[in-house]
Amino acid sequence: MLAGGEETIVAATFLRITGEAPGSIFLILQKEEAEELSYYLTGKKVDIAEGTFDELAGSALQELGNILAGSYLSALSDFTSINMQPSVPSLAVDMAGAVMSSGLIEISQAGDYAIVIDTIMEENEGNLSSAATGQFFLFPDPDAFIKIFEALGVELP
Amino acid sequence: MKIDHKKVIKVGMAEWKLIESPNTIRTSGLGSCVGVVVYDQWRKKAVLAHIMLPDSTMARHKQINRAKFADTAIEDVVAVLLTKGCSIQNMKAKIAGGAQMFSFSSANDIMKIGPRNAEAVKNILRKYHIPVTAEDIGGNKGRTIEFDPEFSTLHIRTVNQGEAVI
């Protein structure tokens, strides 16, 4: 099930990747996780399901996505020796299905399958009650698959 | 007394299904995709299509999933309703979706796919002379929709604005 179900409310940070292997990255935080993280960062309790939630909380979540996606991308870039640059992040709080499908549009022009690299983050300090805070989804564009697979030494038929 | 065994038929992304009353049909989490209901209010039959892209010529391969594109999906939807005894004069449509979930300053065509999907769907329906009796398109919100062919009503649920019926 995609990030907990099509209708699950999530806070999604979305970035486009440009460079040699273009694609899309999503950082998906479940509602409670996003609220807890933004409380942790801003000291304000917010309900992200309310349309007009705090601007500062939104900005904090967006920046969090930017930092995490940025370090994720530079690690992947180092590992594969492929040059990748992230775009400015954009945040959306809505149904998981609605936000994630935006990332599948590019891929869906080539075929009916997508490769999803699912990453779970954990933090050791124990400041947050939930062990796993957030999931990354990397959707490489159709042509980028080959580049990434080659760099990882996967043999293609 | 007549007992109705109502079922809710679910339609996934890039799929369409045909139903008739008393069943209802739904699709969840429409973002930039468009949900198109083509229905016949007299025969109480309806098809719901969950369309992802405006035009099948965008496909890079010849082998395509026809339900994914507005042009091919609507062609098939109309064809199946015709085989079920519905006439094109009685067909009507309700549409929802076509949102832009993320906003970017750079003008990227892919990011404007929602409005393009909605536009394509309307153009194709016009080509078949199928009137759009109600619509809820655009914006930046996700939608879950459910159509009831008994009353020709489309229920739309969003995260922030609750439920609406069109």
Image: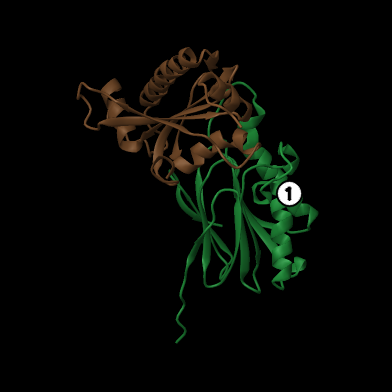
Chain colours: A brown, B green
Task: Answer yes or no: is residue A148 visible.
Answer: yes
Residue that sits furthest to the bottom in the current view: B1
B27 w.r.t. A54: above or below: below
Residue A69 placed where, x, y %?
43, 21
In the foreground, B9 or A11? B9
Which residue occupies 41% across, 19% down?
A63
Q: Amino acid at mark 1?
A: Asp
The quadrant of the picture occupied by the N terminus of chain B is: bottom left
Which residue occupies 42% across, 19% down?
A72
In the foreground, B21 or A145? A145
The quadrant of the picture occupied by the C terminus of chain B is: bottom right
In the foreground, B42 or B56? B56
Q: Which residue is mark 1?
A: B71
In the foreground, A29 or B149? A29
The chain to which mark 1 is attached is B
Residue A57 placed where, x, y %?
36, 25
Residue A136 placed where, x, y %?
42, 29
A2 with respect to B94 (left or right): left
A155 with respect to A71 (left or right): right
Secondary element at tag 1: helix
B143 w.r.t. A89: above or below: below
Task: Answer yes or no: is residue B141 visible.
Answer: no
B93 with respect to A99 (left or right): right
Q: Quadrant of residue A106?
A: top right
Report the label total.
1
Tell me the crowding category of disc 1: few under 14, some 14 to 19, or many 20 or more residues within 10 angstroms, Cα based: many
Which residue occupies 54% across, 34% down?
A103
B84 w.r.t. A23: above or below: below
Residue B43 placed where, x, y %?
65, 74
